[in-house]
Amino acid sequence: MTFPSRIRGGLTRRRFVTGLGAGGLLAALPRTSHAFSSKASSGIIPPMPSDRWDLKIGHTRISLDGKTMHAPTAGGTVPGPILRWKQGDTVSINVTNTLNEPTSIHWHGIRTPSNMDGVPGMSFGGIAPGETFTYRFKLHQSGTYWYHSHSGMQEAMGLYGALVIDPRRPDPNACDRDYVIFLGEWTDVMPDDIVSNLKMQDDYYVFRQRTAASFPKEAREAGSAGAALADRLAWSKMRMAATDIADVSGAIYTYTLNGHAPDMNWSGLFRPGEKVRLRFINGSTMTFFDVRIPGLEMLVVQADGNDIEPVPVDEFRIGVAETYDVIVQPKDERAYAIFAQSEDRTGYARGTLAPREGMIAPLPPMDPRPVRTMVDMGMGNMKPGESMKDMDMSGGMSGMKMDGDMAGMDMHGMDMKGMKMDGMDMSHMAMPKMEVDDPGPPPINVENQMRAMMPIDRTGSPGDGLENNGRRVLNYKQLRATRPGADLRPPTREIILHLTGNMERYIWGMNGRKFSESGPIRLKLGERVRFTLINDTMMEHPIHLHGLWSELENGQGDYRPYKHTIISQPGSKLSYLVTADTPGMWAYHCHLMYHMDLGMFRTVIVA
């Protein structure tokens, strides 16, 4: 049993960090760090990207927020250097390992041959101590991406950095200034210790539990004390906590922006009236961030490296491994805060956009902590205290509309014999049935704690804690590609995967099995496949498929957004299309590192 003694005053520090959300000004007090200088960045776009890079992987002593670690780093910094490339170029990256253990670099979201993807034991053997490995591949894409180690838990300790690929043609969203905003976490608690503590007690780092004092407010929101009590009993029966939003919290994490702790105040400069592009990357291990810039509208123009129709928002949630590009245009000569609070509201990362160095922007108060609901339990829109027999299903499907409830519905494989719509005979539109790989509901056992009885489409939801907060918050249904997809064929096969886990034992998997008990998913080269995810857990899962694009089915028809990481919300069901156009053995996993490491991982073989 291992207790992280390095949490020195963890509760006191946590209360201090969350208390900073009361607003006001913070002094910029840089602390000893090899990560970044406190000097403001200019945002001037480099004149020429490079197609040749040398990266040295080694240990660097990093001190941040009073926490010191000899971290594995790329180029001696956390994050590592920003690599800027050009679409169409063939790049060569020489990675030299000076650690005393193997390492690797995975180019997250980049379409490469499988032997250049950088996953040891799957696509190559890793980079041994003292060796240099040359990654070489052609760039078929542009946009914002990132790189990180896929060896051991080096990524959790700081081995990651940003990638920017300039488009071959003139950028339709060209801006005067261009900044990478890399969100992350910092702790001096070793990853193995964190896993040990979570295995011992799943809520080890969760201190915000529901109490008697919070019961009256819950009763008012639920409509009665009985309904609120029934809700608590339901969670208790499952041995889960409705306040368990994040497995690892601000109790040990310092949330960072470009390697800066909140009181270090990373700053980027602008001139009033300029267009400023902010390339947000969530390179954290376990944290979802809710991002806003009070006083500035953000125009979201890119998701996971791919252009989308611009969406004006006040806030967006960025899951682990996702990237979003936004454009802002500050008009006034004042400072603006970049405020990224963790989903569980135990801390935040912050930076400043300012016309002059040394300016500090006031911070908004932190939002209330989210609480999981019946939706997250996989009970659809059921209210606390309500059971399935209480739900009125008498209306059947009469209220469904083709332009709303059924938008984006794929009728491939549907038998339309005898069906009519508005008097129109649709029998002639019958299509061949799709092959479906469906294991059925996973069993409740030591590896699976619950089952979503009524999973729903949550692509129109911004996420727990962001509903009806008075701000315009991005959701997945708003993502629309700027051009139709490259492959417009309907899928011929559907693969249904249940995301499963047992929080009490801290075991994660797919279809009720962890990685060690699961075989590979096999795709035929050129095959068009639908992946359907049913989230049987009460946690968000950022699912990442290496080597292939995932085209999110969000009601946008042929203009589905291409993504490399897709967030599955708790109690939800969503689908995406995949064209198996690149042969090889590919990793497929949750990008919450400790979920992946504890079993939510599969192999996809394209041949």
Image (spheres, rainbow, N blue to C red):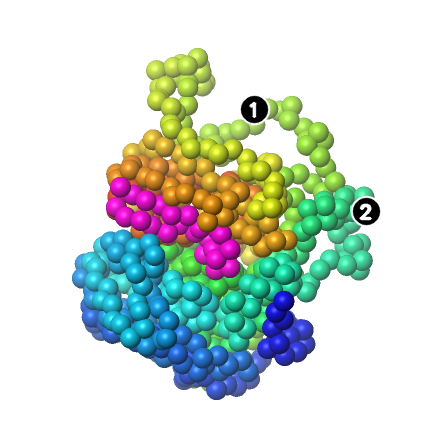
Please say if 242 is above or below 381: below
For image coordinates 24% across by 54% down, the residue present is 113
Residue at 46% in and 49% down: 516
Work out whether residue 389 or residue 263 is closer to the camera in this orientation and state it.
389
Please state which of residues 275 and 250 is positioned toward the viewer in this rendering: 250
Q: Which mark lies nearer to you, 1 or 2?
A: 2
Q: Which residue is mark 2?
A: 225
**In the image shown, does 183 or 516 lie closer to the viewer?**
516
Could you say which quadrant of the image residue 5 lies in?
bottom right
* Picture mark count: 2
* Horizontal and vertical percent position of residue 291: 50, 63
**Magenta range:** 583-607
- Please indicate, yes or no, whether residue 137 appears anywhere in the rendered image: yes
In the rendered image, residue 22 lying in the magenta stretch gets the answer no
Apparent side of residue 589 relative to residue 121 in the rendered image (left or right): right
Above or below, comparing residue 20 to residue 135 in the picture: below
- Asked if residue 522 is positioned above or below residue 539 in the image, the reply reads above
